[in-house]
Image (tube, helix red, strand yellow):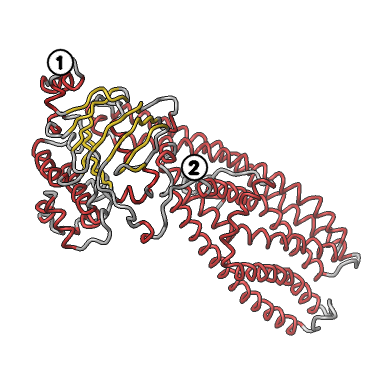
């Protein structure tokens, strides 16, 4: 462990933030103790066995001292047999019992920790995926992933190792000091004057070395960032002939890493020399003074041997507490960060699939009534300002306007990712609040511009629209989405792995998979968020044909930059700076000579 920490190349051990351990923080983490409740029988049994193994561990130095005294013809304790063989046999019996108890103690602690941690992971993950979109707008994915991985692993270590080890070392230290005082109060006072000083110096020195090690790791992380950026943008590096520049930038960082590591090595060498001298010096001092007591007849050889062993026990216990305490601080910090997520207000979605079935059907009538909206993270910027429009069941409503006008925000509001500050959104004439969240989202589908596919097979990605779909339904949806032909051309067909985010498929192919997924969902309201804006002409033709199939007999909200794709819409809503500037059919809007729609259309025509 020490070598790994002192190595400048070691970045695997994540240096998690620590929290102060006080009454307030301890009160917070007691909320996690509820997860131990189902396993409390095994947990308390493991604690009892831990206490027993610690006590039996304290017995072995006495056995060893008794053996030495018995070999010299002296009986040390009246309750121990007088012969060497009998004492040795009894020691092995106690050792066997301790090993058996230790086995169950370890197994039970691990069972309790793993099961409790699985429950915490489940609840944390479910809470995460049911939190509102605004929560994710203010968090990084890596940070949230760290909650489930690094933070919960730290809590696991605390339950399985840190807590148990602290209790064990506490028993060994207190019991060891008491037994030391029984054997020789003079030697005990000598030891207690030397040992704490050594430990305090070692702790502060260790913190200083860890600080230098962290500096080296930070610089190494910076150098790794240079490598990552260079390799990701290797085409730019080569195009601008900047290989030499990047090499110089990287070399500068790794030289700084080497400099910090060498500086740290000097202090580590000094620290190692200090520990070796002082630790062995303390042992020599104790043995020296003990030998004087033996020569005076104030202590037997067996007692001196026992005293030395107990001294090692006490010293090791004292030395382990700083690291154990640091581990406990990390666990407390991790617990607080996990509790932050568990304490967030989630959306009204059940963890049981059956509870999320549709209870109220929506035919497809949609109304925005004077909707005012600003993103909670940017409350001072009004994105939609008294926006009103209506869409009848089966109608195609196009929403156009310059970038930043609020088009995609309307899609998020329809899906109830966000809620307006003023005004209302009506489905079939009833406020959105009269429907459950799952009723609305189960009957609204979106095909975005940048389609995100999961890293599984094509079949799994299409079936995501309806998890209970049959093979026949999946194939039929793919055929209607103009996707079956290219899927069938793959060697694995529908079992083809699409790769992370669907990188193994082209943009047009991903769009058609998304359309097949939406067809399988069979929504009442469809949102097309610039679904063809980034495709080439042939892909756009295929996708447009699939979209025509998808829009049949359902309300469609079409968000588009390419105005040529929405000329046949029943109504076109023109947004500018969050307000509805115009609305009507293509022909009606083109008649407004000074209208925004005609201006935007003329710009695209000229291009």
Q: How far apart are the two marked residues, 1 and 2, measured between alpha carbons?
A: 69 Å
N-term-proximal mark, 1 vs 2: 2
282 vs 414: above or below = below
Q: Determine the secondary structure under disc 1.
A: loop
369 vs 417: above or below = above
Q: What residue is shown at x 54% (from left), y 40% (from top)?
A: 213
- Residue 306 lies in quadrant: bottom right
Dot 2 surroundings within 10 Å: few (below 14), some, or many (20 or more)? many
Q: Would residue 404 appear left or right of 153 to someone viewing this image?
A: left
Instruction: Write down the residue under mark 1.
Output: 593
Q: Is residue 175 among the parts visible in the rendering?
A: yes
Q: What residue is shown at x 27% (from left), y 54% (from top)?
A: 464
Q: Would residue 114 appear left or right of 595 to someone viewing this image?
A: right
- Residue 158: where, in percent of width, then height? 58, 56
Residue at far front of view: 429
Residue at far top of view: 594
- Residue 80: where, in percent of width, then height? 80, 81
Quadrant where the C terminus sits is top left
Q: Determine the secondary structure under disc 2.
A: loop
Dot 1 surroundings within 10 Å: few (below 14), some, or many (20 or more)? few
Q: What residue is shown at x 83% (from left), y 61% (from top)?
A: 290
* CB contact under 8 Å: marks 1 and 2: no
- Residue 442: where, in percent of width, then height? 30, 51
């Amino acid at each position: 462990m020490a070598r790994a920490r002192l190595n400048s190349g070691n970045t695997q051990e994540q240096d998690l933030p620590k929290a102060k351990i006080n009454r307030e923080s301890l009160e917070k983490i007691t909320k996690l103790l509820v997860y131990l409740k189902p396993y409390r029988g095994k947990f308390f049994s493991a604690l009892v066995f831990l206490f027993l193994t610690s006590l039996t561990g304290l017995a072995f130095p006495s056995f060893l001292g008794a053996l030495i005294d018995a070999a010299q013809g002296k009986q040390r304790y009246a309750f121990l047999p007088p012969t060497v063989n009998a004492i040795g046999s009894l020691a092995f019996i106690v050792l066997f019992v301790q090993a058996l108890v230790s086995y169950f103690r370890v197994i039970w602690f691990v069972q309790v920790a793993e099961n409790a941690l699985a429950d915490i992971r489940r609840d944390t993950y479910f809470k995460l995926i049911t939190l509102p979109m605004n929560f994710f707008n203010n968090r990084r994915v890596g940070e949230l992933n760290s909650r489930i991985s690094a933070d919960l692993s730290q809590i696991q270590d605390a339950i399985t190792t840190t807590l148990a080890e602290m209790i064990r070392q506490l028993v060994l230290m207190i019991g060891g000091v008491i037994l030391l005082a029984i054997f020789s109060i003079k030697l005990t006072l000598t030891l207690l004057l030397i040992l704490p000083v050594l430990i305090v110096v070692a702790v502060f020195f260790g913190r200083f070395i860890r600080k230098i090690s962290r500096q080296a790791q930070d610089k190494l992380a910076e150098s790794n960032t240079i490598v990552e950026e260079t390799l990701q943008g290797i085409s730019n590096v080569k195009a601008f002939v900047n290989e030499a520049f990047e090499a110089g930038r990287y070399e500068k960082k790794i030289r700084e890493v080497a400099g910090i590591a060498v500086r740290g090595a000097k202090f580590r060498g000094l620290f190692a020399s200090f520990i070796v001298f002082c630790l062995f010096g303390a042992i020599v001092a104790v043995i020296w003074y003990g030998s004087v007591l033996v020569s005076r007849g104030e202590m037997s050889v067996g007692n001196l041997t026992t005293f030395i062993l107990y001294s090692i026990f006490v010293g090791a216990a004292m030395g382990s507490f700083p690291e154990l305490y640091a581990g406990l601080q990390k666990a407390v910090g991790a617990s607080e960060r996990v509790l932050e997520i568990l304490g967030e207000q989630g959306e009204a979605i059940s963890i049981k699939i059956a509870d999320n079935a549709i209870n109220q059907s929506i035919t497809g009538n949609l109304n925005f009534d004077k909707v005012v909206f600003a993103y909670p993270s940017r409350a001072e910027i009004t994105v939609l300002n008294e926006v009103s429009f209506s869409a009848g069941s089966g109608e195609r409503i196009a929403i156009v306007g310059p970038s930043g006008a609020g088009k995609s925000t309307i899609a998020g509001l329809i899906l109830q990712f966000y809620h307006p500050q003023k005004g209302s959104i009506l489905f079939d004439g009833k406020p959105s609040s009269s429907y459950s969240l799952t009723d609305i989202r189960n009957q609204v589908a979106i095909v975005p511009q940048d389609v995100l596919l999961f890293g599984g097979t094509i079949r799994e990605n299409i079936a995501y629209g309806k998890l209970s779909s049959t093979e026949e339904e999946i194939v039929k949806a793919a055929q209607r989405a103009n996707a079956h032909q290219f899927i069938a051309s793959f060697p694995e067909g529908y079992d083809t792995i699409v790769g992370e985010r669907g990188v193994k498929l082209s943009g047009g192919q991903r769009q058609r998979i998304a359309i097949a997924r939406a067809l399988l969902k069979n929504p009442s309201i469809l949102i097309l968020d610039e679904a063809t804006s980034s495709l080439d002409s042939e892909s756009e033709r295929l996708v447009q044909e699939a979209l025509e199939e998808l829009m049949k007999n359902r309300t469609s909200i079409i968000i588009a930059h390419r105005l040529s794709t929405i000329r046949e819409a029943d109504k076109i809503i023109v947004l500018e700076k969050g307000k509805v500037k115009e609305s009507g059919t293509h022909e009606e809007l083109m008649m407004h000579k000074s209208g925004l729609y005609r201006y935007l259309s003329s710009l695209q025509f000229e291009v």
